[in-house]
Each structure stands twice: as C-alpha cells, then as structure tokens.
Image (spheres, rainbow, N blue to C red):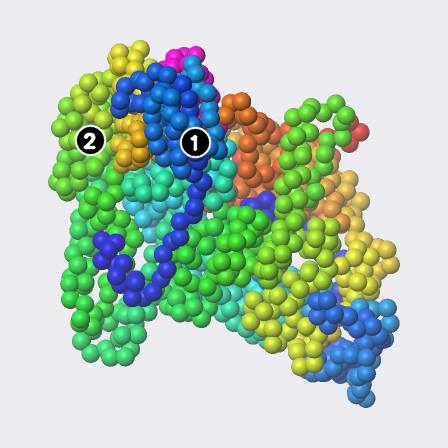
Amino acid sequence: MKKLILNLFLILGFSSVVFAQVPKGDVLIQNATVLTITNGTLEDTDILIEDGKIKSIGQNLRQPNNVEVIDAEGMFVMPGIIDAHSHIAGTSINEGTSQVTAEVSMEDVVNPMDVSIYRALAGGVTSIHLMHGSANVIGGQNETLKLRYGTTNPDDLRFEGAPRTIKFALGENPTRGGRARGIQPQTRMGVEAMIRNAFNDAIEYRDEWAAYNANRSNRKIAPEYDLRMETMVDILEGEILVHCHSYRADEIYMLMNVFSDFGIEKLTFQHANEAYKVAPELAAFGASASIFSDWWAYKLEVYYSTAYNAAILTRNGVNTSINSDSGELIRHLFHEAAKSQKYGSLSDNEALRLITLNPAMQLGIDDRVGSIEVGKDGDIAIFDKHPLSTYAIPQMTFVDGVKYFDINTDVADQRIMIDPESTIEDVVIFSREDHDMCMHEESIVNFYELVNEEK
Amino acid sequence: MKLLRILSFRLFVLLPFLMAPVLVNAQSDPTGESPVTRTYAITNATIIPSPGAKIEGGTLLISDGVITAVGTTVNIPDHAQVIDGTELWIYPGFIDGMSNTGASRPDAMERPNNLFTPDPPNDYAGITPEISVVEQLNIEESSIESMRKLGFTVSHTVPYGRMLPGKSSLVLLTDVEHVDHMVLKENVATVSQFVGAPGSYPGNTLGIMAKWRNIYRNAELSKRNTEMYASNPTGLARPANDRVLEAFYPVVEKTQPMLFNASSLLEAQRAMRLQNEMGFNLMIGNLEQSWKIIDELDNNNVSVFLSLDLPEKPDEIDDEDKSEEVAELEARRLEFYNRYMEQFAALKAAGIKFGFSTMDVSNSKIKKNLIALQEFGFDSTDALAALTTHPAELLGINNITGTLEAGKMGNAIVTTGPYFSSDSDVKMVFVDGDKYEYEIKEGSKTEVSDEVLDAVIGTWNYSSTTPQGEQTGQLIFTNVDGAIEGVWTSDAGNPDIDMNNISYRDGVLTFDIEFDAGGQLIEIVVTGDVVGNEYDAEASIAAFNFSFPLMAIKQDPEN
C-alpha cells in the first residue's frame, strides 16, 4: 500500500530519511569453545570478524594486522542473545488512548541513553525487540534494535533492514482499557470483533486508493490518507509481522482463525502461557511463541501455566523463544533458557536456540543474527562457563564486531546523559516491579492504574 | 531546569511591590500622563548600536517611533525631550525568540461528557493549528511589563496549548489599548509540541508523532484537491473543508516554518525526523540540549532558539570523608553542567546563528544566566547578538529592528552601565518609540517579607496517603533573589520536582507541581493552612478528579 501512496508523494515532493552510519569492528577471538547453534559445538576454535561481519570460523586462523585479538581459551562463545519482548530503551510504551493505534511506532520513542541497554549488554544481549505495550488491541509498531550503547542518536540503534513488526493484544489488558474508557472492547468477544473490523476497514481503504490510482489520467479528488489504515493494509500484505500479547489457549486459537480468514501468515504469540494446550494447532498454522520460562500468576488469566511450556512447544515443532519483558530478567536470559532443561530436558542446543536463532526467526532477522556462521553479523557473547551453567558470567559482548561490554573494563557509571541538577544521594536501584513492562503508561487511564503497573 | 515544562513564578504577594512603569501613549488622556513629545534624544551616552560596535559619547535620536539618528554629531530638534546620557549605556531592544509573553493561558478545557477517547474533538486533543496567538494576547498580561523591564522589546510569542496550539506572532512589548496594536507580525510560525491530551488520543509522543504525519500528509492532499477544485470544479466531488489542514498549507508550501517546542535532545531529534520525512522549514525553540546535534541542526538548516533556562551549578558535598564513588559522581555531574553551559559557544563556533527562548526560565534568572555564560566562552557580544541581530534575522525582521540604526524601529534599552554585569540596572526601555522608565533603587533588592520568611522558608518533611500507600519526602522552600522557590523531593527516589505558582497569603500556602507520565503532563495542586510548623494540606489532581491529604512538619533550622 505504501508503494501506491509513495508515487503520489514523490510528485508532491518530499525527501527520504537518511540512515546514520554505525561503527563496525574487527576482532579475532581465539581458542574458544564456540556454540554455533547451527553447526554444533566447535572446540578450540577461532572466529574472525571483519567490518562487523563474521569472516571465518576455524582453527589457527591467520591473524590480520591491526585487529584486536581476544584469547578466549577456556571460554564459551555464543551468538548474541536476542530478546523478542522488551520495553527498555523507550520513552513511551503505550499509546493506550485508542484501541487501534497501528499508526504509532516505537521507532519514534527510542531512547538510546537508557542505562538498561548497558545492563542488557552485560547479560550477553545484543538485540531486542522494543515492543509497544499491551494496553490496546492493535497497538503500535515495534522496533528491532541492536544494542549499540554509547550513542545519543536513536537511529544508531536501529536494526537496519529488520522487517517491520506490530503489537496486538488479547485478553485482560485491552478489555480493562476498554472498560475504563467506556469503549469497545470490554470482553474477549469485543477484541475479536475489533480486529476483524480493523482488517475489513483496511480492505475498504485499500480498494478506495486502488480505484483512485487505477486511472491517474483523470482529474480526481484524492481520498483521505490514513496512516492507521496504511499500516493495517501492510499487515494484510504480509509486510509487517504480528506479535500478539496473549495468555489463554482459546484466544490464541481465536486469533489463528481470524488470521486464516484474512490470509495473514506471519504470527508470533507473546507470553502465550497456555500455548502448550494448542501446540499442535500452532505448529499447523506455522505460528511461533515467545514465552516466559516460569513467570505467571500475576493476574487471573495467567494462572494456568507451566514451566514445561517451552519444552512442550519445542517438541511439537513450534518455533519458541524465551523473552524477558523486563529490564531485570533481560540480564540473565541464559538462566531463563536453562530452566527449559530442568523442566522438559531440552538439549543444550535447543535451550540456547530459545534465546538466539528462534527469536531471530520470529523477528525475521535470522539471516543476519542468531547463530555463529560465516557471513552473519559479528554479534557475539563470551562467557567464562557454559552459558547454561548457573555459574556462567558474561565476559564480553560484541555488536557488529564492536565491543560494547567487557567485564574487565566495566565502568560503574555508564550514564550517557546526566541532569546537572540531580542529587547524588538518589541512587535508584532497579525495581523489577515498576519498570519496562507492557502496561507501562497504561496508567493514563486513571490514578489507580498510574500506581499499579502491570504487564 | 527540569525538562518538564516548569516555570518558577514570583510570589504573588510581592507583585504590588515591583517597580511600576510609567504609562505612556494614551491617545486621549484625561490623566495627563501621555508624553508631550515622542521625540527623544539621549546624549553623551555609550551606545552599542549592534553587537561588537561601540560609540562613546554618542546621541540616540528616536522620533515618532523610529530611530532617526545615531552617532556623535546629531542635530537635536527643538521639540525633542533631551535626556542626559552621561554614564548611561544604550543597547538595541532585545528580541525573545520564543515565549508566551503577552498571552494569557486559557482556562483548562473541561473533559467533555462521554468523551470518545480514541477520537476526541480537535480542541480537546490540542490540535488547533488554525488559532492565532493574537486570540490569547491580553494587554494587561503582567509578563509584558516584567519582560520589558529586562530589556525585551519584541517577543516571538507562541500560544498556550497542547500538540498543535496554533500560530505564533511577533509581539511588541508595549502598553497599548488594543492587542492588535501590539502585533508586529502575525502568523510567523505554526507551533508544535510534544504535549499529549489528557487520557485521550494522542496521549503521548507515540500518538503525537503518528498524528502529526497523518495531518501533514492529508494537508498535502487537501491542498492539491482544493487547488484542483478551485481551478475548475466541474465534475469533481467537493473536497471537504478542514481548518486544521488549511492551517498547514503555508507549512507545506514552505512559506511558513514549523516551530517545535523541543527542550530535550530526543525531542529535537524527533522534530528533525519529521522534517527529514516531510521537508518543511523547521524552527526549534526552548532547546536545552543541543551539543550532540550541532551538525544535524546545521545540515537541516534549523532556526534555533536555545533556552535560557540553565542549570544551577551543582554543589559538591563539603565532606572530606565522602566516598570515592560520590566524588566521581559529582565530577560527572559537573562535566554535564559544563556541557550545558558550553553549548552556546559550541553552536557559535559551528557558525550557527541562534536566538534565545525565555519560555521556561524565571525572570529573575535571565540576566544572571546571561552573565554566567561569559565564563563559558560566550561573551557579552555573543549574548547581545543572540538577543538582537540573530533572532531578528531568523524571524525575518532584521530590516525593522535588532540594531540601533537610523530608520529602524525605536526599540532600545538604556542602562546604568554595561548590561551584562551584575551591578547595572535597566533605566529606560523604548518600545516602538515609546519610553518606559524605571526607578533605580540604591542597593535595594526585593525581599521576601519577614512574615513569609518565618512561615514558609525552610525544609518541611511531608507524608501523604495515596492509593499506593504512604509517601514521604521533603518540601524545600528557599528565598531566591526575593522570590520563593520550592522543590518537591521524594524518599522513594523519584526525581526532584520544582514547584510552580507558590503563594502564601493569610496563612494559606499553595503550590503546584507537574510531572511527566509518559508524555502526559500531570499537575498536582497542593493547598492548605500553615499553623506554626505544621502544614495541613490537600493535594488534588484535576485530571483524575482525585485528591488526597498531605501533612508536613517544618524542620527546626537549628538541627
């Protein structure tokens, strides 16, 4: 749909966005145990990254001139961890005032100065999916980021070339927003109706513009432009991947039916605590799930949960990832992945895939990241022990071959922007309960929700 | 200094004691106060006709609103009022690049009954680009006098409001009988800001950015549709009228810039993101953090008005035993203080001509801040340029004002010494050729009365029962140059918030604080009785029609 409109705007004359140049690094990592994800575990192996890309993997690689060498003997190298559900690095999370806000985009509110980015890097994370919140049925578009911490330019964090994605939300969160405002939807039935209506409106909109564009020679009054509908059309045309906040099996199944009706194929369920109940159906649809390892019971619809969710989904052939949805959990996603071995006995490689290649596939960036292969991006995490060990501590984290975290040169104060009028005594310790979660700013509804943030 | 839009206001009770201006320019004047002549000659003065120039022993002649001569050999007409300028300095009148001066804040719009939050009426959503700030101007607005007294003669005044509050005007800070007579130039820029509508769309930056794009794209289409229809309507469906879209036409045509109120780095980057997508001419005002985007501002040809709301120099903890960590944190804080202060010189070094915005700074700090910048590579000539020639150029009035030259408008400041020093005072200000005189009080400063000092100034420990439980912290009131300023702190570790509108009268202490809940500005008004060292107050949040009790005990200053 964008293409149709684009021609018109080219006539009207507007310039395009200029992308910033981001740093790319060169590094040679030697003698490591390399957890490739796609090609098993390689002992005593070197990885050469040049100009931000993995150039070669093998033993005794020749050392090029002027390239930093890291002796990783006894250490474990894995692909940078990818968090498919995060709310760090955003200045706003929910535009919850309307129940369909497909037009808004997290790319407008990226905050590159959020110290949480550095904390995530210190947990081996190299990419996140900065998601809109779950306050409304069709929320905003998300933004896939690379954690290039140290810049003040939001554009520097963009995962350039990553597909567009969007947040949908089912269940208690959007219906509570609806009830608080006295608008649709107030029930799960209303949620389904709103999604169907939004797509039907988009089809009408597409037809209207198609008719207008079909014969450009005539003098005609152009229809109204609607960025919301533009976005919905892009979803229908498969240009935007849908990531849907959901918990219950019945609503997960409902959305697959809706998407089948509208011919939309690319679908990932976020949270999906009851996905294990519809695992074969998810596999048949080709839908993915991005879940918590063992976090539940924070509201009624999240009681029927199990720590075996990841294993059951994996065994049923559903592409599954484990996410954080938290500025705290994001620091130890490798522990979260390891829980799938305690509950469900996934293999090392299956467990690691939950936080690397699988989320990369869900975000459509698996051609670039998620495994250690020649030609992929130099996004790498180095651990002192096997990352699935309780004792593992991240040592270094690279994005595009550039080192953004090194435990040996870790400076305590990582802030990029400091208020000169701040008081020094105010050391804020991160609180898991009140930051970087889905329902952040849903608070706009009323005072009580202002002080009770939920995901 | 908070990026929240917070202003410090002078205590209301002190207003009557402020030095009063001499009223002029009444057309028919039974009071007999109108001047006998509008021709003024100030002789034997030190004249700074433009930044970097200087005339010793010069004469400035202003006649019927216009500067008719500047120099050392000036023929003074017989009907001129001659003012001995010995030991006086004369500067061109200042131009404020962005402020609300002269405008009165309209009453907050009540939340409509049965508001459909996804699609509120435009006025509630704050989408009123068709409004001219002239509708908000008020000849009795006290800011006209308080800013003029500092030397400002022209203000680029923007309307109060939310996302798209309306269009700005250049306003002469004169005392006239009708607002129209104040307006030097109407509809200078269309104004945008990142202020969401309370509880409705667009509620925060996310919605504002999307809505902005949507409006702009439709304005482009609407303009095209309307022109097509106007040229030949036959056979065409009538395009719908839309005042919002029509207000964007001059921006789309690039005959009028879009002025973004963007104080933070991220807000300025968002404004430039929209500019890159759409291609309009951009002004950014009220900017507090420019040092990281100097190249972008330059490349995008942005007209910049930097905020004069500068941070206070941070105090270091005076304790020999303070930890190394605290010392390091203090050093980094100081480093950022320096960046704020050095950005003015940095922009100048990059060749960017910018003006100032006084929007979020209290009047008492404007001159102090200008002087403070001299230590950071931004001297009095630079400051004068940013107050006169540069904003005149950026606002397209450099052929009218900005310098003291024959033929320009009679806008001038007469001071008792160099303006940019702490021991000079403004003695007269000429606006549009009319004279405003100020009494110079020897060594006297406005002081907070003893009553207020005793009752309010100090540190109060408060506790408040909110739905999330007991909240505690401190209310710290200080006497800053004769005005009460206050800070709200929280023991929960939330950032300190500057209080606004502090007033103490008849034992009732009232103030408000504003904080940003993700783009939505929440205002809490606190009011209650002070009895001895106890403050028994109620805090209310109008947006939620909700209030809760707040109790505070004043600390004994001896402890």
Q: Is residue A394 magenta?
A: yes
What is the x, y in percent for residue A345?
26, 11
Whether residue B436 is visible: yes
What is the x, y in percent for residue B187?
49, 69
Q: Residue at x 59, y 44 (%)?
A: B2
Q: Quadrant of the C terminus of chain B?
A: top right
Give whichever of B554, B162 is nearer the camera.
Answer: B162
- What's drawn in magenta, residue-wise? A381-405
Count residues near mark 2 (Cα–Cα under 10 Å), then give few for <14, some for 14-19, many for 20+. many
**Outermost residue, bottom side:** B78
Mark 1 vs mark 2: tell me if same chain: yes
Which circle marks residue A72 in the picture?
none
What is the x, y in percent for residue A28?
42, 27
Quadrant in the rendering for residue A222 = bottom left
Whether residue B221 is visible: no
Give whichever of A372, B527 is nearer the camera.
Answer: A372
Left or right of residue B76, residue A157 in this image: left
Q: Amino acid at mark 2?
A: Ala
Q: Chain of mark 2?
A: A
Mark with earlier residue (1, 2):
1
Q: Is residue B341 magenta?
A: no
Q: Amino acid at mark 1?
A: Pro
CA separation, marks 1 and 2? 44 Å
Q: Which residue is mark 2?
A: A287
Q: Which residue is mark 1?
A: A64
- Rendered view: A210 above or below B414: above
Quadrant in the rendering for residue A376 = top left
Quadrant in the rendering for residue B389 = bottom right
- Rendered view: B521 above or below B304: above
